[in-house]
Image: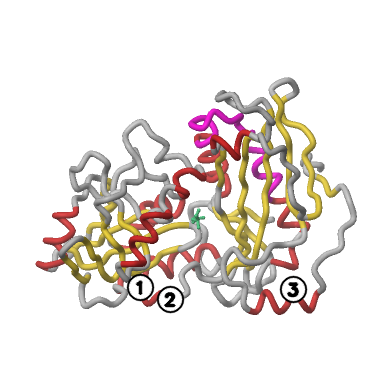
Amino acid sequence: MSTGFSLTRTTRPVPEAERAAILAEPGFGRYFTDHMASAVWTAADGWQDRRIRPLEPFTLHPSAAVLHYAQEIFEGLKAYRHADGSVWLFRPEANARRFARSARRLALPELPEEDFLAGVMELVRADEPWVPAAGGEESLYLRPFMFASEAFLGVRPAAEVTYAVIAGPAGPYFPSGVTGVTLWVTTRYTRAARGGTGAAKCGGNYAGSLAAQIEAAEQGCDQVMYLDSEGEGKLEESGTMNLCLVTSDGRLLTPELGTILEGVTRDTILALAPGLGLTPEERTVTLEELRSGAADGTITEVFAAGTAAVVTPITGFKGEGYEFTIGDGSPGEQTMAIRRTVLDLQYGRAEDKHGWLRRV
Ligand code: COI
């Protein structure tokens, strides 16, 4: 059955030997597959021109609205190869729904869920040899995105929008891997305010995070820990990842939704927590609660969750005039168990009781 996204031209793919060398050490976000999916929306005609085509640069007029007003959104999801060679997506419908929510917030047209799924599926089919082999933690990272391609400088929702999906083989997001990362608690920068775009996956949120990321690196930390914008010392998220805390009495705490990104991995972990003996709690967690809990041992583990980062142990925090570790400063047992559980599901090593996997 045609999904609308069809291969329209023959392509000259990356030679097999070169692809094999890339797959041996893919890194993250450095290499891309042979094709891309794309579609165009106009206010007059709606969605049209759905294609799988060779990966190639866009031609944009210098006045294209995205270049000036950042009317753009994106998603991140992965295709996993299972031991029998089959390829699977994990909860792509959740990404499709979040993409539609982000679109509404950025006044972009909603892409129907079936188009989101078809574009992603057909791209993975076209570039199937790029899906890394089973056995490790590599996957094919998929990046759907949508931007205002109309050539127009007035500030209003664009009347022409481009949708595309690109893909690239991916290893661990953090080169330090599962040894744990440290977070810089910034008080100089905030990520999102009430009523802002914090819950949307839009490029502007990430552009705004870069100065804080530089600050974190200057402080010797790997990533940023954002607090709420109203100065109440509430933990929010870590820019590219949601935050989770494990308590000594078996609770899994994570900041409630509102100004943070509604992570698919976050949601997955909340659903899996009871099966791992943890009671999930979505609620306000303050920096003070984290600091005192780390000091008296009631907060035993902290980790970050995201598609790219999967489950990444957070081993320490640093802020203006203080520094503390979580537990003994090494990755926690529960964190590693959650990580294993998520990965086992994604790679087909555990039974998919929730019906989250979609075969490509
Ligand atoms: C993802 O986890 O897919 C993200 O979007 C984070 C990314 C900005 C690296």
What quarter of the picture does the N terminus occupy?
top right
Camera-side residue: 166 or 127? 166
Q: The disc labelled 1 sits on which kind of residue? A: Gly
Q: The disc labelled 2 sits on which kind of residue? A: Ser
* Residue at the image position 65 percent from the left and 79 percent from the top: 24
Q: Residue tagged by mark 2?
A: 176
Q: Is mark 2 within 8 Å of ligand 1?
A: no
Q: Secondary structure at mark 1?
A: loop
Q: The disc labelled 3 sits on which kind of residue? A: Arg
Q: Tell whether label 2 touches label 1 (CB within 8 Å).
A: yes
Specify whether 303 is left or right of 240: left
Q: Residue furthest right?
A: 10
Image coords of residue 180 (percent x, y): 35, 73
Vertical order, 324 against 158 (above or below): below
* Residue 62 included in the magenta stretch of the image: no
| Distance from Cα at disc 3 to Cα at disc 1 | 30 Å
Q: Secondary structure at mark 3?
A: helix
The quadrant where residue 340 appears: bottom left
State which region is magenta: 102-120
Image coords of residue 90 (percent x, y): 56, 55
The quadrant where residue 317 appears: bottom left
Colour logic: secondary structure
Q: Residue tagged by mark 1?
A: 180
Q: Residue tagged by mark 3?
A: 19
